[in-house]
Image: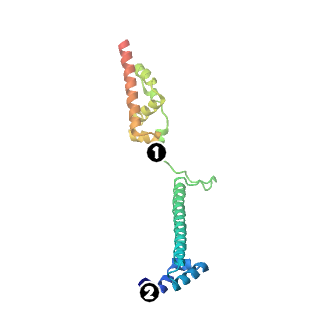
């Protein structure tokens, strides 16, 4: 009885809550609510409780879906803006065409292929160099012609620094074996 008296005293405050207002906007629920307030010990009180729980569950699901849509739309917008900043549109009209954005000059130099074999004058060293794989030759060219670090080469070739280091080391070992076998053969 104390709970019922407390409930009736706070009725105005309770009915002012947006969630309760929305629940009671359904005429069926409002009639059920008034009936339960008049006859609190009826089975309809349990039914009202069950109806409110269903209503509240639906509201929670709707709120969850709403927040997920909002979060995904914000993330989508961020990805689109990021992509637009990375790849700005360039107009084809020559009157309005500005100079295309310049990338890193060092990457341009690294991407330009130069043959290290053209710089080797010793015939034995040249023959040993020609035994290397194409990737080993590119790594050697980046290191010995351009003076690039392992990290810079890795970034430009899309490899890990450790892999570039292994490629370089295996190339050196291959050339050393080739030179040693040629040196012993003479």
- Above or below — where is 163 with respect to 121? below
Q: Is mark 1 on a helix, strand or loop?
A: helix
**Residues tagged 2 and 1 counted as in contact (Cβ below 8 A):** no
- Above or below — where is 129 with respect to 41? above
Mark 2: few/some/many CA within 10 Å (<14, 14-19, 20+): few
Residue 142 x %, y %: 43, 35
Query: Which of 14/90 is in front?
Result: 14
Number of marks in picture: 2
Residue 93 x %, y %: 64, 54
Residue 73 picture quarter: bottom right
Residue 31 x %, y %: 58, 82
Marks 2/1: CA distance?
80 Å
Residue at figure coordinates x 37%, y 25% from the top left = 173
Query: Which of 15/126 is in front?
Result: 15
Q: What element carries label 2?
A: helix
Mark 1: few/some/many CA within 10 Å (<14, 14-19, 20+): few
Reading the image, the residue beneath label 2 is 5
Q: Which residue lies furthest to the top in this view?
A: 186
Query: Which of 30/37 is in front?
Result: 37
Query: Which of 127/61 is in front?
Result: 61
- Above or below — where is 47 with respect to 180? below
Reading the image, the residue beneath label 1 is 105
- Position of 48 with respect to 5 (left or right) is right
Residue 50 x %, y %: 53, 72
Q: Which of marks 2 and 1 is nearer the N terminus?
A: 2
- Position of 92 with respect to 173 (left or right) is right
């Amino acid at each position: 009885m104390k709970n019922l008296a407390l409930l009736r005293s706070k009725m105005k405050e309770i009915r002012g809550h947006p969630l309760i207002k929305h629940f009671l906007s359904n005429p069926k629920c409002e009639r059920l609510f008034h009936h339960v307030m008049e006859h609190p010990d009826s089975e309809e009180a349990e039914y009202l409780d069950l109806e409110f729980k269903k209503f509240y569950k639906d509201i929670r699901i709707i709120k969850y879906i709403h927040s997920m849509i909002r979060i995904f739309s914000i993330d989508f917008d961020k990805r689109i803006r990021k992509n637009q900043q990375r790849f700005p549109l360039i107009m084809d009209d020559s009157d309005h065409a500005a100079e295309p954005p310049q990338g890193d000059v060092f990457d341009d130099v690294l991407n330009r292929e130069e043959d290290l074999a053209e710089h080797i004058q010793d015939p034995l060293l040249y023959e040993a160099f020609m035994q290397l794989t194409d990737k080993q030759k590119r790594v050697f060219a980046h290191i010995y012609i351009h003076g690039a670090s392992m990290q810079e080469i890795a970034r430009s070739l899309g490899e890990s620094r450790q892999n570039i280091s292994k490629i370089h080391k295996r190339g050196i070992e291959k050339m050393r074996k080739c030179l040693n076998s040629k040196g012993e053969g003479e």
